[in-house]
Amino acid sequence: MLLLTLFVVVYLTVDQKIKNENNDMKVYQEITLQPSPEIPQNFIWEKLFQQIHMALVDTKISHKHDANGKEKVAEYSEYGLSFTNYNSQINALGCQLRVFSDGEKKMERLNLSRWLERLLDYCKCSTIQTVPTVTQFSRFQRRQFVTNIEHMARRRSKRKHETLEKARSHYADFNIQLTRLPFIYVQSLSSEKRFRLFIEQEIVSQEKTGSFSCYGLSKQATVPWF
C-alpha cells in the first residue's frame, strides 16, 4: 500500500512538471491594486501601467531585418500581461495584473519591485510564482478605433505635410467607432503622446507562442488564463 501511494505521488509530481514544461510562460508576478477613497482606480491603473510600459521598454529586444531593401529594426518584449478580472461588458480591467515570463531569471531581470517602488501605497506585487496547470489561455491585444476624426486629421496633416483641409478630406467617409472595450491612458515613450490604449481579450484552448509589444500585448501570443 505504501509503495502504491509513493508511486501515485511520484507520478502526479512528474505529470505536473511535464504539463508545466509544456507551457511557454512558466512564472509570473501578480500586482493587485489597492482601493483608495481619495484616488480613482483608473488613475492608479494609468500610473501603474506607465511604469510597466517603462520596464518593458527598458528590457526590450531589438532585431534588425530587411524590408523591401531597407534595414528596419523591430522591437518587442519577452513579457506578456494578463488582466485577471477583465470584463468588456462593464468596460472594466478589474484590479489585478499578472506579468508572465518563460523563466525565473528573466523575471528577476525585469525587477518589478524597482519600477513599482513609487506606487507601494497603491498596489502590492507578489513574489515570483510558478504558473499552475491550466486548460485555457488568453490573448490580450491592442485595438485601435476611429474615435476623433479631427485629431486624426491634424496628425495626418503634420505627418504628411498636407494642409489641414486635405487631411480632413481623407477622413470624410470615416465613421466614428464606438466601443465598450476597457482602456488605459498611456503616454508613449517614443512620441510622448498620451492616448487611450484599448485592450481586447480572447480566451482560447491552445497556447500560442510569439512576441509581445512593449505594452505586454500581442496579436498572436497567449498567456495562461487562471
Image: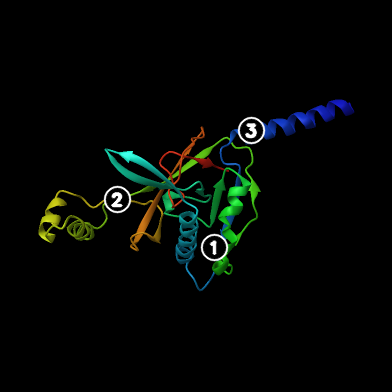
Q: Residue at x 38, y 43 (%)?
A: 64
In the rendered structure, the answer to whether residue 69 lies left or right of residue 107 reads left
Label 1 crowding class (10 Å Cα cut-off): few <14, some 14-19, many 20+?
A: some
- Alpha carbons under labels 1 and 3: distance apart: 32 Å
Give the residue at mark 3: 19
Which residue sits furthest bottom?
38
Checking the image for residue 145, the label placed there is 2
Count up the numbered dots: 3
Q: CA distance from mark 3 to mark 2?
A: 38 Å
Q: Which residue is drawn at the image coordinates 53% and 72% (left, top)? A: 37
- Residue drawn at (58%, 36%) of the image: 23
Return the x and y of residue 130 as percentages of the image width and height: 65, 45
Nearer the N terminus, badge 1 or badge 3?
3
Percent position (x, y) of residue 25?
A: 57, 41
Identified by mark 3, the residue type is Lys
Q: Nearer the viewer, residue 34 or 79?
A: 79
Residue occupying the point 48% across, 50% down: 86
Q: CA distance from mark 2 to mark 1?
A: 30 Å
Task: Check disc 1 and report its element: helix, strand or loop.
Answer: helix
Q: Secondary structure at mark 2?
A: loop
Q: Earlier along the polypeptide chain: callout 2 or callout 1?
A: 1
Along the line of sight, which residue is nearer the eye, 196 or 217? 217
The amino acid on which the numbered mark 2 sits, given as a three-letter code, is Phe
SS class, disc 3: helix
Residue 115 is tagged as 1
Query: Where residue 84 sits: x, y (%)?
Result: 53, 49
Whole-percent x and y of residue 119? Answer: 55, 67
